Amino acid sequence: MRTQIVAGNWKMNCNLDESQHLLNALKQKDFSKADVEVVVAPPYTNLYAAHQSLKDSSIKISSQNINENEKGAFTGEVSPDMLKSVGVEYVIIGHSERRAIYAESDELLAKKVTAALKHDLKIMFCIGEVLEQRKADKHFEVVKEQLEKGLFHIGASDMKNVVIAYEPVWAIGTGETASPEQAQEIHEHIRKVLADKYNADVAEQTSILYGGSVKPNNAKEIFAKKDVDGGLIGGASLDADSFAEIVMSF
Ligand code: 13P
């Protein structure tokens, strides 16, 4: 069976105190009844403290980004080895905000994927179309191309360390969500693209998360869909009760 995952992408929110406060609140929650891997992605500055604070917890830590180089003159950047050394297990690569605001290209994302795998970091690889592409009925093509250009240079055996997050850009932070049917339809498509590129096994084993305005009141319906294996949560992950409710929607 595929791993079900609920991950909180905190984006550029929470200073150290706020981060510790949120983690403490999350540690009080009993996630044991949900058969779900819980992941949080605090900002870089809070990762080490998060690792210390979550030592006795099953909650895993992700970074929100990674640099593709080993080390050196890359002012302001954070290397795979640095992330590893502070207890990071997952990295988010290709979030639409990085693609759009920081102009991260498919080629760059492909390098980040290679760098993360080299350092035994698991990847949450984000894909998703913008509104114009959805309106033009191009979303199936768009996600396929994003996978081909950013991810498909890796071999089938590396896919066990990859989770895909489908996040339609028009649903991020907008309060608008894909309907459960829209999510299912495109997740099924993504799984087929994986089967065509790799094999049926890889397609069957790869967790595909939905992201985009997932809230406690819509998570259950979305997660109930056959090809939706969890969620990548933005805004609602900043509130321990909301995030826990989403986790418990499984
Ligand atoms: P929201 O849940 O705030 O829409 O954000 C989704 C997201 O971008 C998670 O990576």
Image (cartoon, rainbow, N blue to C red):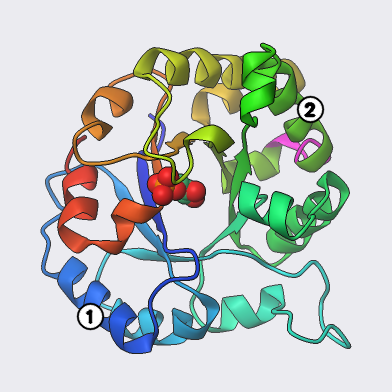
Q: Position of residue 67 (x, y in %)?
A: 75, 70
Q: Residue at x 60, y 77 (%)?
A: 83
**Residue 201 seen by the camera:** yes
Left/right of residue 227 with respect to residue 136 in the rendered view: left
Q: Nearer the viewer, residue 195 or 12?
A: 12
Gap between marks 1 and 2, in whole Å?
Answer: 40 Å
Left/right of residue 78 with respect to residue 25 in the rendered view: right
Q: Residue at x 44, y 82 (%)?
A: 46
The tag on residue 135 is none
Type of the residue with mark 1 = His
* Residue at the disc numbered 1: 21
Q: Describe the element under mark 1 as helix, strand or loop.
A: helix
Quadrant for the C terminus, please. top left
Is the magenta region chiefly helix, strand or loop? Answer: loop
Image: 17 above or below 124: below
* Residue at the disc numbered 2: 145
User: Between disc 1 and disc 2, whose residue precedes?
Assistant: 1
Residues in magenta, as a range: 151-156
Left/right of residue 239 with respect to residue 142 in the rendered view: left
Q: Position of residue 8 (x, y in %)?
A: 38, 56
Q: Describe the element under mark 2 as helix, strand or loop.
A: helix
Type of the residue with mark 2 = Glu
Label 1, residues with CA under 10 Å away: few <14, some 14-19, many ≥20? some
Q: Residue at x 48, y 42 (%)?
A: 172
Q: Position of residue 120 (x, y in %)?
A: 63, 63
Residue 246, quarter of picture: top left
